[in-house]
Image (cartoon, helix red, strand yellow):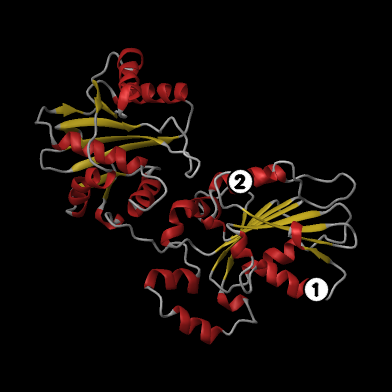
């Protein structure tokens, strides 16, 4: 299979690692061919039955030579198969000058998205031969501790609604591996909790890892919003200006929420994006124009003088015609989200159907253990403002 990008995803024991190794070895008879197989740590590459021991099992009887100090196999043709890892936040820079015709990443849910995708830049076609450039990933569904780094995998590869055109998803099951003692393996997996068992035994990407605060079943769905709210707000949680190399870049999120006379809270819009500050300002202004002046605008104010300056800039230069206020938040994210979670559990939060629903529900159900918290912070902020205002009868137009 010579498609540019493919993903082997599913049950543990389904032969995904073997498929990666076989794909990497496909063109080792061609001079100039170079392949690399990657995991989150070199220790995991070396575990029993992992990629490095498996490569020795396969290649030791051949003419290929293992060069231990470089962690690679060199073949009589001159082709190479290397092993690497992406563990620390800067490890992808270790491959800046490297060129490969094949990149394979095993258990990619343990890898940061931007580091995994960086390896695309290391793919080079060699003009002297017709070897295709290929990018392959493989993984079981993410466990709870992997959710922060690994939720991008489902979005990019598994979910047919978000999977990119041209990407091939190959589902792996235990039955696909004829060398596995299935009965013993199933016996072992049956001792796990139900969610982990379903992920590893069936390769189920749809079973949800539960967070500690929200359940998606709490949120009702409505085709449209009521025509009148007592008050409507748009609450913005801006992405941090300073990047943390240990984390994926944050999103800016803006939640529009309205409160009804009978105490229901409708989320009517959720915006989420990553852009440079000037583009963020333009989108915040655009949202305000579309929301109309009856919608009050709040924005979380970061501590210190930079937070004061940001709020002042938005008030003077971006949103001078609108009711706009900065919000000096107190308490941690969990404390701020707790009142909103209580109302959601009571069935008092309604989502108006929109393209953003699934993305919001996936994030909030993982809160506070998931990678991103921006939409949850925005929704919690909007709820807090609505819960503390009186009835002033704003009509939505």
Q: Residue at x 66, y 46 (%)?
A: 119
**Residue 367, image x, y percentages:** 33, 51
Q: Is residue 251 above or below residue 137?
A: above
Give the quarter of the figure containing the N terminus: bottom right
Of 325 and 95, nearer the camera is: 95
Closer to us: 7 or 188: 188
Q: Residues within 10 Å of mark 1 (few under 14, many from 20)?
A: few
Q: Is residue 235 left or right of residue 271?
A: left
Q: Position of residue 116 (x, y in %)?
A: 60, 49
Residue 58 location in percent, x, y?
76, 73
Q: Please name which of the two marks, 1 or 2, marks the residue nearer to the observer.
A: 1
Disc 2 element: helix
- Relative placement, left or right, of 184 versus 66 is left
- Return the x and y of residue 145 as percentages of the image width and height: 43, 59
Left or right, 29 with respect to 244, comes to: right
Q: Which residue is mark 1?
A: 60
Identify which residue, 367 or 348, lies in the foreground: 367
Q: Is residue 295 above or below residue 207?
A: above
Looking at the image, residue 244 sits to the left or right of residue 38; the answer is left
Residue matched to label 2: 117
| Residue 199 seen by the camera | yes
Q: Residue at x 39, y 49 (%)?
A: 358
Work out which quarter of the rendered image holds the C terminus and state it: top left
């Amino acid at each position: 299979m010579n498609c540019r990008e493919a993903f082997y995803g599913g049950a543990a024991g389904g032969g995904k690692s073997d498929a990666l190794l076989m794909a990497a070895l496909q063109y080792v008879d061609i001079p100039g061919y170079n392949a690399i197989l990657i995991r989150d740590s070199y220790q995991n590459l070396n575990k029993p039955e992992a990629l490095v021991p498996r490569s020795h099992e396969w290649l030791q009887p051949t003419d290929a030579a293992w060069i231990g100090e470089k962690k690679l196999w060199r073949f009589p043709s001159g082709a190479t198969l290397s092993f690497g890892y992406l563990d620390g936040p800067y490890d992808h820079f270790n491959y800046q000058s490297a060129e490969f015709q094949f990149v394979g990443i095993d258990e990619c849910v343990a890898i940061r998205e931007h580091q995994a995708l960086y390896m695309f830049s290391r793919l080079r076609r060699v003009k002297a031969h017709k070897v295709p450039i290929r990018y392959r990933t493989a993984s079981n569904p993410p466990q709870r501790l992997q959710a922060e780094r690994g939720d991008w995998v489902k979005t990019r590869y598994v979910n047919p609604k978000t999977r990119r055109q041209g990407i091939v998803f190959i589902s792996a099951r235990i039955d696909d591996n004829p060398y596995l003692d299935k009965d013993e393996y199933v016996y072992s997996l049956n001792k796990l909790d139900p969610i982990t068992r379903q992920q590893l035994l069936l390769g189920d990407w749809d079973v949800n890892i539960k967070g500690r605060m929200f359940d998606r079943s709490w949120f009702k769905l409505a085709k449209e919003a009521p025509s009148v709210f007592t008050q409507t707000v748009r609450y913005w949680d801006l992405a941090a200006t300073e990047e943390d190399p240990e984390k994926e870049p944050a999103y800016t999120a803006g939640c529009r929420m309205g409160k009804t006379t009978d105490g229901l809270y409708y989320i009517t819009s959720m915006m989420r994006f990553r852009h440079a500050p000037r583009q963020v300002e333009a989108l915040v202004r655009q949202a305000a124009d579309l929301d109309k002046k009856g919608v009050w605008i709040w924005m979380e104010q970061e501590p210190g003088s930079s937070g004061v300056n940001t709020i002042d800039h938005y008030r003077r230069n971006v949103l001078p015609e609108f009711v706009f206020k900065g919000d000096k938040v107190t308490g941690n994210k969990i404390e701020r989200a707790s009142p909103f979670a209580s109302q959601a559990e009571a069935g008092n939060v309604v989502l108006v159907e929109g393209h953003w629903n699934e993305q919001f529900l996936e994030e909030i159900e993982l809160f506070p253990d998931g990678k991103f918290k921006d939409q949850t912070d925005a929704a919690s902020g909007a709820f807090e403002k609505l819960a503390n205002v009186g009835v002033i009868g704003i009509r939505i137009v």
